[in-house]
Each structure stands twice: as structure tokens, then as C-alpha cells.
Amino acid sequence: TEPEPLKIMISGAPASGKGTQCELIKKKYGLVHIAAGDLLRAEIGSGTENGKRAKEYMEKGMLVPSEIVVMMVKERLLQPDAQEKGWLLDGYPRSLSQATALEDLRIRPDLFILLDVSEAILIERVVGRRLDPVTGKIYHLKYFPPENEEIAARLTQRFDDTEEKVKLRLETHHQNVEDVLSTYKDVICKVNGDAPIEDVFAEIDKALSSILEKKSRTDSAS
Ligand code: AP5
């Protein structure tokens, strides 16, 4: 029998590399990537009332109220694909009330990855970040430039990716992170996110394969 699928949370300051690592994790482990920020941006893109309200908070670098975020993430998490393939929750939970809502549903991760990146690096990563609207791929002008001119010409920037706004986002992160960490202290894996993309992934990869190995051992023993 197949071992139970992986359930992973990834957290870290703005631009610490969550989305970048999630792409790599998804490719290797086939988990369903659920990013709270992406769900919110999709909502903004569809022009819904919730999207409009969410954008007001995102522009200030503040957390979007839980009544908007909690339902949205919960619904996605309970879809059959996430239950069958396992999930990778990115940027969620970000507050004690969000963590508690998951605990109440008995939704717990096997591992809580915390990307640890120094502040000076974060600002540079935010300011240089670019997105490909066609493929959804995340680039960086200096650290991960686009492969060709055609892609370079169509790259966009996120509305909250300015130096001023990232400082507000960082403040919000500092205000909430300890509460979330306290909920998951038994499963936290702190990773040095200052390192190059492939080195960060190597560390995460090691942690994930060791969990999978443990899971298959327990499953075959039972
Ligand atoms: P969200 O979209 O989650 O933004 P964030 O947390 O600020 O994180 P980012 O997406 O900016 O960065 P990342 O860590 O994914 O980094 P990336 O891989 O792109 O949230 C946005 C807003 O939505 C919030 O402010 C809030 O208002 C709201 N929101 C979201 N979740 C919420 C929740 N749960 N509750 C309430 N509100 C919520 O990398 C960044 C750049 O660095 C890229 O250019 C990349 O190429 C480069 N890079 C990555 N890794 C490396 C490396 N190792 N070396 C060099 N460059 C690298």
C-alpha cells in the first residue's frame, strides 16, 4: 500500500522564497500547492466583493480578515486532489486564529518549514521579483533572470512589491509569526533561506524524503 500523502506547511517572511521552493517541491513530490496569497489574487482578478475587500488590506501589507481567508483555504484543502496527493500550504496559517481553525478540524502538517532569511536580502528579492503572467513562473532580475527576450518583455510586477510596502508586510509578519510557530513547535524545520535556490531545496528535499521514509515504515508495520 502507498504511504499516507505528505502534508506540509511553508512559512517565512515576504519574499523569503516560499513560492519558489513550492514549485520545486510540487515538481518532485506531486503535492497540491495551495498559496493563500495566490487564492486572494485570483479573487481580486475575478472582481468579487471579497476580492475588493482583500485588496484594501493587501495594499497596506496587513493580513486580510480571517472571515475571507479561512473559508477560502479550507475549501481548497478539502478538495479530493489535495486529500489524495497530499498538500503544500504556502503562507497559511499566518495568525493564531487561522492556526486554531485548522487544529479544530484536526488538520495538522507532518512538517512546518520555516524559511529563515535576513532582512537586507528580503528587500532586494522583493524589488527584483518579476512574474510571468503566461506560465505563472517567478523570476528575479538578478538571481533568476528570464530565459529569453520574449519572456522578459511580458514580465509583470506585483502591486505590493515596493520597498515601502514590503516593510509593512514584514512588520505584519513579525507581529504574527511567533503565535503560529507555537502551534507547530513539534514539527518545525528551520531552513537557511539566504542560500542559493538549489541549496535551499536540497535541505527541504532531505527533510521531506526522510518523512516519507518514516511514513512507509510505519504503514508497513501496521
Ligand atoms: P503572499 O502572496 O503570501 O506574499 P508574501 O508572504 O509576502 O510572500 P511572497 O509571495 O512575496 O514571497 P515568497 O516567499 O513566495 O518568495 P518568492 O519565492 O516569490 O501574501 C500577500 C498578501 O496577501 C499579504 O501581505 C496579506 O495581505 C495577504 N495574505 C496572504 N496570506 C494571508 C493569510 N494567511 N491571512 C491573511 N492575509 C493573507 O521569492 C521572492 C523573490 O526572490 C523572487 O524573485 C525569487 O526569484 C527570488 N528568490 C527566491 N529564492 C531565492 C534564493 N534562494 N536566492 C536568490 N533569490 C531567490
Image (tube, rainbow, N blue to C red):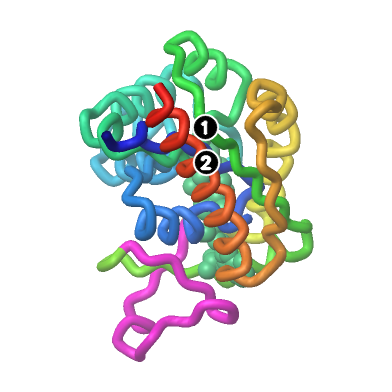
Task: Measure how far apart labels 2 and 1 are at the Cα level.
Answer: 8 Å
Q: Name the residue that disc number 1 marks.
A: 110
Q: Residue at x 35, y 45 (%)?
A: 31
Q: Residue furthest front?
A: 221
Camera-nearest label, 2 or 1: 2
Where residue 82 appears, as percent x and y from the top left, is: 29, 34
Where residue 189 appears, as percent x and y from the top left, is: 66, 42
The answer to whether marks 2 and 1 mark residues whose Cβ atoms lie closer than 8 Å is: yes
Q: Could you say which is closer to the camera, residue 26 or residue 41?
A: 26
The answer to whether residue 8 is magenta is no
Q: Quadrant of residue 161?
A: bottom right
Q: Is residue 67 visible?
A: yes
Residues rendered magenta in the picture: 136-158
Where 172 falls versus 103 (above or below)? below
Task: Give the amino acid type for the residue marked by disc 2 in the picture.
Answer: Ile
The answer to whether residue 148 is magenta is yes
> In screen coordinates, is 100 left or right of 50?
right
Q: Residue at x 39, y 29 (%)?
A: 219
Where residue 198 appears, as percent x and y from the top left, is: 56, 70
Q: Does the beta carbon at disc 1 come under 8 Å from ligand 1?
A: no
Where residue 98 appears, as percent x and y from the top left, is: 53, 21
Q: Is residue 59 visible?
A: no
Q: Quadrant of residue 74?
A: top left
Q: Name the residue that disc number 2 marks.
A: 211
Where 159 falls versus 4 (above or below)? below
